[in-house]
Structure formats: C-alpha cells, structure tokens
Image: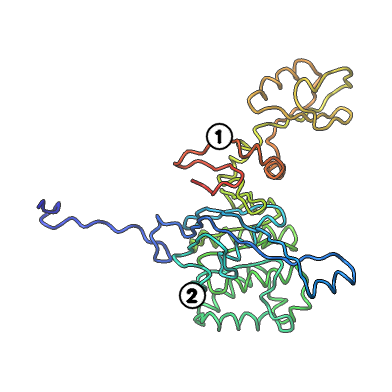
Amino acid sequence: MTPPATHRGHPRAHSPPPIGPDNMPLSMPQIAVNQLSKSFKVAEREGGFMPAVRSVFRRKYKQVQAVDAVSFTVEPAEIVGFLGPNGAGKTTTLKMLSGLLHPTGGTATVLGHTPWRREAAYLQRISMLMGQRSQLAWDLPAMDSFMVHAAVYRIPAAQYKSTLDELVALLELEPVLKKQVRTLSLGERMKCEICVSLLHRPSVLFLDEPTIGVDITMQARIREFIRAYNREHGATIILTSHYMADVTALCKRIIVIDHGRILFDGELERLSDRLAPFKVIKIDLSADVTNYDFAARGEVLSSTGRKVELRVPKGSAAAVTTRLLSDLPVLDLTIEDPPIEDVIGRAFLDKSAAGSAPAASPSNSDTVAAGAGGRT
C-alpha cells in the first residue's frame, strides 16, 4: 500500500474548503432549485345569481400551473434579479423557497435546508419582504412590532439595539416609531417593513418589490443599504422589482420568468446581446430633409421633424452611422443600447426567438430558452 504523501515527516492533510458566514463551504450554492413546480386548483363560475347557486352543488375547477419545472442555483453573497410580468410565477417561487408554500413537484435547498419543512434553524436565517403584504401589527406602533420580532427570533438585547439603531438612522424612522402602523403612509410603512425584516440579520433575503411606494430619493437609499448589507454580511439575495433602476443598480445576474418558465438566466449585460442584438441610432438634423429613405438604413422607430430614431443590427451600426453622416446634414448623432425594459419586454413577446438562441456551453455561459431549466 502506498504511504500518504508527507511534508517534513507528517502526513499531508487535505485543506478544508473555505467556509462562509453560515458555516457552509463557499463552493456550494446557498440556493439550489431543481425542477421546482407549483400548480393550483382554482374554482371558476360565471357571474349572476343562478351560476352562484349551481356552484354550491357543482363547482367547476381549473388547474393553473404557476411555476413549471424551474431550475437554478444562487451562490453565496450573490444578488440575483428575478424578473417577470404580473402572474409570471415570481412570488410563488419565493414563497416556496421561504417555506410558505409546498411545491407540487421538484426539489429545493436553501442553506442546506428544505424550505417547506419550516425548521426553526432555517427560519431564523432567512427573511422574506413582500411589498404587498405587511408583517406589522396594524393597530400598534411600529416599535411594538419590532420588539415582538426580537422576542420571536430571540435576538440578544445588544444585537437588537445595535441593529435597530442602524436601521432607524438609515431609513429615517425616528419620527414614525411611536405611530400606529395604520396611520403611516405607504412609503413610511415600507421603511418599517424593511426594518423588521432585517432585525435578526438574515443570511438569505427574498425581497419582493422592496421599494414599492417610496420616493425616488428613498429608493436610492434602500438600494444602497441592500448593497451594503450584502457586502458587510455576505447575504444572498433574490430580488423582484418592477423598477428597473433597482435591478440595474444591484444585480449583475438576472433570471427572467414568464408563465412559470425561465426564459433567461445570466448576466444582465449579456441580455441585450442575446435577445436584442441591435443598436438605437438617434439623429438630430440641422436642416429639413425630404425624400430620404431612412427605412433603407434600419427600422424607423420614430420620425418627428428633424429628429429620427433608427434601430439597426449591432454588427452594422458603424457602417450605417458612416453612411448617415455622409448623406445627411447631421447636427448630432448618438448610438445607444436599447433600454433594458424594452429588452425584457422583447423576451416576453418573442419566446420563440429566445428558444432558438444558441445553446449555452456547460462552463459559465448564460441560458436563454423558453422553459429552460436555468443556468448551466
């Protein structure tokens, strides 16, 4: 038998993998989802008195597939944007990962736990913030809800005071702490919701529209706090939002979902290359031009007076620009990438194009597919 390799007379020990703040190897994904599905049985009936009476004795049901075999992983300390239109399956997926719903198929692990078992050790390390739902007692001051939260999670007094002071200062909550929650504005209530969600310093955050209802200045401050929390505590975050500023400011990677199926999983900056490989050329003319065929240079998006916008393939943008500058009295010309909102909208409207995109390599490529399982 071959003896173990030695170094200075001692057996060479294998170095353990690096350990993260949650005592998990950093090489392991903190969230792993495999073919996760959820369907609901929904009652249906027509309007009117007689249909209502008939439904008492003979109710009709419809099966709704909210989430359809989605698969993805999220690495430690990663912030992932989870995007899709209303009814796409975003919130349902987050509810399953937080343990609020039991799936009808597939598996998932978060921090090494199966979420829907709702083990206390798991629930103490996660938090889910839903902009459309409240965790606060409606008739009590926000401070009472904070104290209840601290007692439920058994937060040490010193840690509770330190965390609360930090959050109150950041979110400017001092004037509202003693007010009944029912009397707060939507923006004030959202700031309190963020505070109570982070009091126990969770390792994984599921943020469902965390900036809804707050003003632009506070949106920016909340985004900066989320970024700082991620950086200082190594938290793993899945974020859904209809404000693209949230996504572009916080997320390097996004997952686009529609009708319960993943359309895209990859880096945000690569989304345009995959789904909208074109440039937008904006032209400001110094004089009126008649009988010029702009359509021969690209797709005309708008033409108002001396201002024209064209959409051209990315590969031919330079040649088209050169031709326009030589043919026209150009006062100003800019070349831009399409807005991210338009690119994501294109993903929803053109699933067949997404499904025919080049296959991703198994190494570190992005996935673009209608119903694809996730990032390879």
Q: Which residue is the site of mark 2? A: 119
- State yes or no: discs 1 and 2 in contact (Cβ < 8 Å): no
Q: Amino acid at mark 1?
A: Pro
Indicate the secondary structure of the residue bearing disc 1: loop
Q: Amino acid at mark 2?
A: Glu
Residue, x 68% and y 61% (percent of image)?
A: 63
Quarter holding residue 23? bottom left
Q: Counting other residues with Cα less than 10 Å from the Cα at mark 1, is it few (<14), some (14-19), or many (20 or more)?
A: few
Mark 1 to mark 2 CA distance (whole Å): 41 Å
- Image spot of residue 34 (x, y percent): 50, 56
- Image spot of residue 329 (x, y percent): 81, 19
Residue, x 77% and y 78% (percent of image)?
A: 182
95 lies left or right of 362? right
Q: Which residue is the site of mark 1? A: 358
Front residue of 81 and 263: 263
- Image spot of residue 288 (x, y percent): 89, 22
- Image spot of residue 350 (x, y percent): 69, 40
Give the numbered dot on residue 369. none
Quarter holding residue 220? bottom right
Front residue of 185 and 268: 268
Residue, x 14% and y 54% (percent of image)?
A: 4
Query: Is 160 located above or below residue 268 in the figure?
Result: below
- Tell me which numbered mark, 1 or 2, is placed earlier along the sequence: 2
Question: Which colour style is shown?
Answer: rainbow
